[in-house]
Amino acid sequence: MANFRAEVFQNQFMADGASEVHAIMTVAVDGAPGPVAGIGSGKMFGILCDVSGSMSGEKMHAAKDALSKLVQLLPEDIYFFVVAGSAVGQLVFPAQLATADNKSRAMIAIRGMAAEGGTVISTWLEQALGQFQRQQGGVKQALLITDGQNDETDARRLDQMIENCRGVFQCDCRGVGTDWDVPQLKKIGTKLLGTVDIIAKPNEMDADFKLILAHAMAKSVGEANVRLWTPVGAKILFCKQVSPEIADLTQLGRTVKQQVTDFPTGSWSGSESRDYHFAIEVKPGSVGDEMLAGRASLVVVESGNETKVAEARILAIWTDDEAKSTRIERHVAHYTGQADLAQSIQDGLEARVRGDSDKATALLGKAVKIAHESGNEATAKLLRTVVDVDDAATGTVRLRRGVAKEDEMALETRSTKTKRVQKS
Amino acid sequence: MAVYTCPKGHSSTENDYCSECGAKIDGVGKSELKSNGAISTPSAAGGGGSQQSCPDCGMKREPGSGHYCEICGFNFKTGAHGEIPMPPVSTPVAAVATPAPPPAVVVAPPPAPAAPPPPAEVPVPTPAPAPPTTKLLGWEVSITVDPTLKVEDSPDPPAAFEPVVAALRAGSNLIGRSSPRRGIHPEVSLDQDDAVSHRHALLDVHGDGTLTLRDIGSSNGTSVNGKEIKQLEDIPLNDGDQVTLGHWTRLLIKAVH
C-alpha cells in the first residue's frame, strides 16, 4: 500500500487557563501507486447527467459528446453506469465492466437521451446508490452534471438521500451554465466528499470530464478516515479539511467509541497531500501542566478492516511565558486566514446581491487583502473579475459594474480553494 | 495489552500520554517499564514482594516503607489511594489548589508581632455553619502562615496570607506542594512554603472517623503540637491539634461536627 505520513503543526504552548487548542495536520501519501484497497473489488464510476428540459439544445449536445468521449477513456477493468436525470432518475446503462462492447452500448444509450421534464436530483442519487451498493469496497466515484436548480418540493428528500449516499460513494458535481444554485451543489459535493465547479461554456465539458476521470482513476485507497482521539471532557470544536480546498467535516464526524471520532476523507490517490485543521476545547490547565489534547490518525478501511497508516499528536503545555503562548503557529495562521478569505467572499457576494454595496466592498476588499498576503493568486484573480483593485495590500477595492454571472459564480464556487502553506 | 498508569490514576493503553485524560505519563514510569517489562496492576496476593509496583503511580514498592507507596501514598494494605485520583474539586479545596504567590515576590516582611499570636485567634474562614450536632462529620485543616516559626535561613513568609480551609474529603489526603509536571496535586496544598516536600505527609481519615498523620519521608520533617514526629509512622490527631512544617506553615486540625 502507498506510504502515508502525518505531521502536526501547532503552538502547543497555552496561557494559564486557556482551553482552545488548534493544530494543522498534514497528511501526505507517496510511493508507487499500489493496488486498489479492497479485496476482489475494483473501481466503479457513475455518470449522472441532467436531461431536464433546460438542457435541450447546445448543452445537451455538448454533454452527450463529452460523455461519449469520457466513456471511451474508461479503463477496461472498471465498472461504470449511466443515469439520465430529470423528474425521475433513469438508469439508461446499468453497471458493467468497461469492455469495448459495453462502451459501445453505453454510447448508444447516451445518444438516445432526450432533454425533457423537471429536475429531481434525489431520484438520480437513488439510482446511483443502487448501482454502487452492488460492489463491496473499492473506489466509488460519481460525476453529477446539472444546469438547473433542484425542484423545490424535493429539498427534504434530497437531504435524506444525500445522507443515505454518505459513505457509499463520492460525488463530484459540475454546474453547467449559470442557472444552477451554488449552495445546492456545494451541499451535495461537501457531504459526498467531492469537488464542485462551474462549467460556464458547454464546450469546456470535455476537458473537465477528462480531469475528473483521471483524478478518480488515480485513487488507490478506497476509503480512509481521519480519526481523532480526545481526552475525557474535551470537545471537538471543528475538524476542517483546509487544503487543497476547505471542507468542514465537523458535521460529518461519526463517534467510533467514547473519545474517538472519525471524519470521512473518501478515497486517496497514490500521491497527494491534504491538510486538516483541528480545534479542540480541553479542560483549562494551569502553568506547568502538559497534556495530550488529541491523537490524530489516518485510518484506511479495507473490506471492513481498519488499518492505522499514520498518526500525530496534538499537545497542550500551559506556560506563564506570554512570548510563547501568544505566538500563532504559521500553518494555523495561514489556514485560519484562508478560511477567513473564503468566508469573506461568501458574505461579500451575498451582500452584493442584497445591494449592500458598503458591506460588499468592505468584505471583498478584505478578501483581496488576504489573498494578496497569503499568495493565493488563483483566488485573487477570480476576485478581480468582481472588484477593481486599487491597492491589494490595504484591500482598497471598488465593486465592478456589469459583472458576468459566470464570473461571480466561479468566484463563489472556487472561493474555498486554498493556497498551500509556504515552506519556510 | 499492557496497561500503563497515568499520574491521575487512570489505566492507559498508551505509554506516552494517558488514553483517558491525556496527562503525560512520566518518564520514570517508562524506564521502570523497560527494566521490568510491562507494568501491570499488582495482584493482591503479591503483597510484601520486593518487586511489587504501586498500581497508582507505577513505582516499585520500596522495602521497609510500610503499607504506603513512597511516591504517591497508595496504601498497599487497604488499597486506599494516595493523592490520586483527584477528588472532584469543590470550593474549599479549589481555594487550596490555587497556587499561592511564591514567597519570592514578597517585598517586605510583615510586621513581627510582639508575641506569637495564639493560634486560636487566627481568623479562620469557615464554610457555611453546620447544624449543631455531636456526630463527627469529618475533618478540616486550616492552613495558616505563622512568621514566628521562621528559622534563620528561611525566606520571609508571604506578607498577607489569608488562612485557607481544606476539607479532608478523601480517605487519604496528601500534604505537599503541587507539581503538575510530576502529577502531584495535594489535597492540602502548601505551595507558598518551599520547605514543604512535594509529597510531605498524609492525613488519613479512617473508617471509624479517626484521623492520623504520617510523614511520608519529607526532607524537613513534621511536628505535631511542637514535637517532631517519626517518619512513616501514623500519629493520631485530635480536634485542635497543630501541625507545623516547612518554613512557617501551621496547620490547625479541626473536627467538623
Image (cartoon, rainbow, N blue to C red):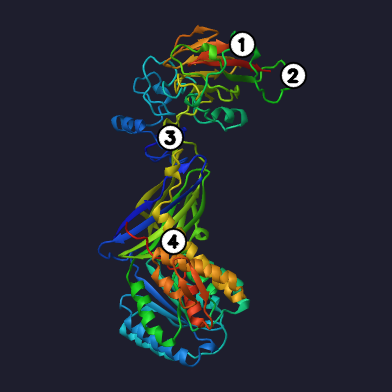
The reply to whether discs 1 and 4 touch (Cβ–Cβ < 8 Å) is no
Query: Residue beneath label 4, please?
Result: A241
Q: Say which residue appears at 43% left-offset and 56% top-offset.
A: A333
The image shows residue A157, relative to residue A55, as above or below, that is above
Which one is in front, A136 or A168?
A: A168
Q: Give the letter of the chain under mark 2.
A: B
Q: Where is residue A405 in the image (x, y as percent from the top left)?
A: 52, 82
Q: In this rendering, is residue A106 above or below A369? A: below
Q: What element carries label 3?
A: loop
Q: Nearer the viewer, mark 4 or mark 3?
A: 4
Dot 4 surroundings within 10 Å: few (below 14), some, or many (20 or more)?
A: many
Mark closest to the chain's N terminus, 2 or 3: 3
- Residue B6 — which label? 3
Q: Mark 3 lies on which chain?
A: B
The mark total stands at 4
Figure check: A208 above or below A138: below
Q: What residue type is labelled 4?
A: Gln
- Circle 2 sits on which residue? B132
Chain containing the residue with disc 4 = A
The residue at 49%/62% (across/down) is A340
Residue A133 in view? no
According to the picture, the residue beneath numbered tag 1 turns out to be B117
CB atoms at circles 2 and 1 under 8 Å apart? no
Would residue B189 be visible to someone looking at this image? Answer: yes
Please, what secondary structure does the residue beneath circle 4 have?
strand
Q: Where is residue B164 in the image (x, y as percent from the top left)?
A: 60, 23
Q: Residue A26: where, in percent of width, then height?
A: 37, 57
Q: Give the spatial CA distance, label 1 vs label 3.
A: 44 Å
- Given the image, on which type of amino acid does mark 3 rest? Cys
Circle 2 packing at 10 Å, graded few (<14), some (14-19), many (20+), is few
Tag 2: amino acid: Pro
